[in-house]
Every structure is written in structure tokens, then in C-alpha cells.
Image (cartoon, rainbow, N blue to C red):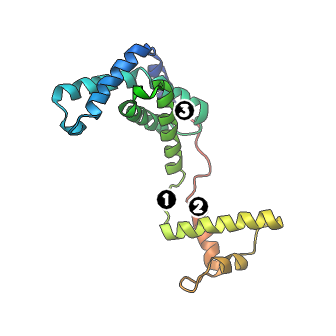
Amino acid sequence: MDQSVRQWIQTSRCQAPLPERTVLELARRIQRWQRHPQGPDHAPRAVRAAALRARDRLVQHNLALVAHTWRQHHRHLPADALQEGALNLVRAAEKFDPQKGYRFSTYACFWIRRGLFRFEQKAKRLIAFPEQKAALMIKAQQLIEEHQRRCGAPPAMEWLSRQLSSPRYPLTATQLRDLLTQWHNTQVSSWVTV
């Protein structure tokens, strides 16, 4: 494990979880700011300052959730994913509504997992692929998988190119092979373990 990750995890463990009563009080302060009638940007300075202090305290005492979720489910992701998880923890603190009956830790875990998942999805592609070509490649992959399930072997490029061609966008087997190669080269096949 990378030294910076170790340090991040150690720092996150320094803060003990808050009592439920304290969490509810902090959440109420944040909600006062978030639900200001004119919007959070127009809330009085004192309300905003109290809410930001409450949010920071709630986040600080729950950073261990980010480290725990990363270790349990997303350890294969780089250390940058921890930052994404922490940003989503901030978002959870701002959106948490204690009136709905959930514990903050349960609600926050959802947001942390969501952030880590999105980080993973964004990072899977190193190079952006044009949207129209990406849609074509996704359709090609679906046809390949369907053909393999049905016949037990991948389809011929000529057959696949005929399936994907249209009068407006003709596609030869060679063009399709080149596109598939480009598509596969833009994918990250594995993560560097930290």
C-alpha cells in the first residue's frame, strides 16, 4: 500500500464516530443552510458559517467510512479514488435529512460507494472515444456476445460489419476491425494496485 494511502487511512481513524444526538444537531444546522428560502447562496453569513463548521465536523468524524469502503470494495482503484469518496461524503453531509429516519453512516456509505463507482467508470477510459463510434462499438460488442452465446464462436468480421452498416454509414470489415482495435486500446485493462 502506498505511503500516502497509509497516511490517509491513519488520519481518518483519528476521529471517533460522533454520538447520534450530535450527528442530528449538526445535520439540522446544515439543513437550515441548505433549505434557506432564498437558497444556500443567499443564507445569512452566520447560518452559512455555522453550517459549514457543522458539515466539516460531520465529514471529519466520518472519513473512516471512506477508507473502509475503499478497502472493502474498491481497493483495486488508485489512491485518487479516496479523494472522490471524500468529496461524496461532503455531498452526503449536505444532503442528509435526519427526518427520513436513516442513520448518517448508512446514508453516507451510499454516497461514498456512488463516488467510487463513478470514479471507476470515468477512469476506465484513458482516451475519449467519439460518441457515435462508441455507440457503434457497444452495439458491436452486444452482437459479438449474442453470437457467441448462440453459436459458441465469435462472428466473422464480414458478417458483423454487414449487421452494423447502414445506407448512410457503410462499414467494411477492415474499418470495423480498426475501430474495434482503437476501442479496445482506449480501455484500461487493469489497475495498478496501491
Closer to the observer: label 2 or label 3? 3
Q: Of marks 1 and 3, which one's residue comes earlier in the chain? A: 3
Residue 93 located left or right of residue 75: left
Residue 181 located left or right of residue 125: right
What residue is shown with label 2?
185
Residue 127: mark: 1
Residue 158 location in percent, x, y?
71, 80
What residue is shown with label 3?
70
Mark 2 to mark 3 CA distance (whole Å): 27 Å
Instruction: Tell me, yes or no, if residue 108 can be seen here.
Output: yes
Residue 17 located left or right of residue 35: right
Q: Of marks 1 and 2, which one's residue comes earlier in the chain? A: 1
Residue drawn at x 35%, y 32% as measured from the top left: 94
Residue 150 location in percent, x, y?
80, 66
The answer to whether mark 1 and mark 3 are in CB contact below 8 A is no
Residue drawn at x 48%, y 38% as measured from the top left: 81
Residue 162 location in percent, x, y?
67, 81
Residue type at mark 1 is: Ile
Look at the numbered disc 3 and give the secondary structure of its residue.
Answer: helix
Image quadrant containing the C terminus: top right
Instruction: Tell me, yes or no, if residue 56 can be seen here.
Output: no
Look at the numbered disc 1 and give the secondary structure of its residue.
Answer: loop
Residue closest to the far right: 152
Residue type at mark 2 is: Asn
Which class describes the residues within 10 Å of circle 3: few (<14), some (14-19), or many (20+)? many
Residue closest to the far bottom: 167
Look at the numbered disc 2 and give the secondary structure of its residue.
Answer: helix
